[in-house]
Image (cartoon, rainbow, N blue to C red):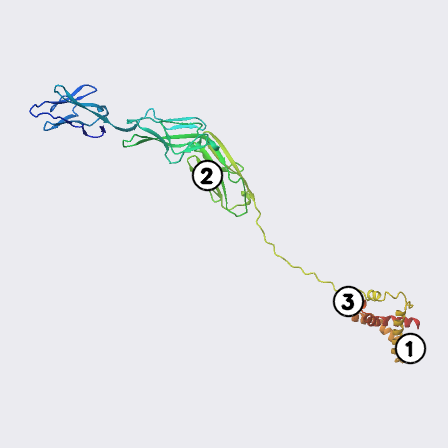
Amino acid sequence: MRVSPLREKHSLDSCDVHILKALRIPVAWLRVDTQTILTIANHVITKNHRIGVTHSEHKTWSLHIRDVRESDRGNYMCQINTDPMKSQIGYLEVVVPPDILDYPTSTDMVVREGSNVSLRCEATGSPTPNITWRREDGDRIILGKNQGKNKQEVPSIEGPVFNITKVTRLQMGAYLCIASNGVPPTVSKRIMLVVHFSPMISIPNQLVGAQEGQQMMLECHSEAYPKSINYWTRENNVIIANGDKYEPSFSDNVYKVHMKLMIRSVAMSDYGSYKCISKNSLGETDGSIKLYHIPTPTTEPTTTSTVPVPTTVEPVENIQWSRQKPVPSLEPSSNEITDASSTVVRSEETRLRDKPSLEESHEAENVIDSNSHKSFDDDIGPQRIDNTAQSMSSKSSTWGCMTRSSTVICIIVLSALS
């Protein structure tokens, strides 16, 4: 028989007595382990006021125990005094829900990172409770060296003792010691494990560039416990305060702190080195971030310049010389030039026949000589390039050009001869 001590009253299994009513033989209840007589017939013999007895037609006798206690556990016997004596034994099992003992169960612990830790949990109850360790936040428990392949994670640990070798900050937190034995309610105790270590800083970007007028955010990550004091400084070690220019902010989670520094509008005076500093009772550390200048891109207007083509005309003499280069002197040296000269002379003589006298001829020569360059420039200027090309590609064209240019030369020759 299993009886909980929380019940107000409990009756042992009844003892059935099959005897003649006429005999009226009394029935007694005894405690076997102590050989204590509890009741005889309708009378309670023991001084324990929690004991009682009832019967039904002197046939069924029941022993009642109120406010059952763990000490009531044991064997009970109902006995009739016949010859020989007859008896029946029943066992009373009293179950007790678990209860965690304050001693020697561990309390909140504060340890240095890298030390060994042993957590203990002791509980009583009937049956003997089982002990289970879990993290209060529901995370898995980290075992091993916490590095590389040796790292192990488990949801729970069984047993009254929980050992941690070389504890780290990752194992810091609240642990629950849970005791259960199948008898409700299950009980637990919270044990806080605090790991102390000096500050450590990590920086995502140590070199940051920004343009003038740009808004910039600098970031640092700090880890420390006990909680650290965190702040930002410039190159002159002056602490940066919150204001119109700068806005430092800090967000923490247990032992981690996310440090931010916002520069609202970067100016030339803002470029340089910044430090994020973290300190606690165990030490101090800092990290450096350099903010450098990125030039603002400028757009230059595209200009188009026009270079004028020179329109100067080379002297007529050069062109005449180039065209008359085959004639080295006034004396004819080839049939072609001789024929040309002759033709020109004849043409000129024919033109001069219409003149009345030699003086008029001289006057005409002077007029032509004075105006020869002008008329030649007027004729040659627009057609210089074309005539030059034509003189190299067509003999007839050269002849026409040579005819006009040779007129002056022939006149000069005639004047000399005269």
Residue type of the residue flagged with mark 3: Ile
Task: Please identify the quadrant where the N terminus is shown.
Answer: top left
- Please tell me whether mark 3 sits on a helix, a strand or a loop: helix
Name the element at disc 1.
helix
Q: Name the residue under label 2.
A: 258
**Residue ranking furthest to the left:** 22
Q: What residue type is labelled 1?
A: Leu
The amino acid marked with disc number 2 is His
What whole-number distance in Å separates the C-alpha atoms at marks 1 and 3? 38 Å
From the image, which quarter does the C terminus lie in?
bottom right
Instruction: Give the image location of residue 117, x and y in percent.
Output: 41, 26
Q: Is residue 378 left or right of residue 248?
A: right
- Foreground pick, 116 / 276: 116
Instruction: Give the labeled residue for mark 3.
Output: 385
The residue closer to the viewer here, 333 or 20, is 20
Picture coordinates of residue 122, whole percent (x, y): 33, 26
Q: Against 346, is 281 above or below?
A: above
* Mark 3 vs mark 2, CA separation in Å: 84 Å
Choose the circle earlier in sequence order: 1 or 2.
2
Q: Can residue 46 be seen in this view?
A: no
Vertical relation: 380 (above or below) 261: below
The residue carrying mark 1 is 358
Q: Residue at x 88, y 69 (%)?
A: 336
CA–CA distance in space, label 1 to label 2: 119 Å
In this orientation, which residue lies closer to the viewer: 337 or 132? 132
Helix, strand or loop under label 2: strand
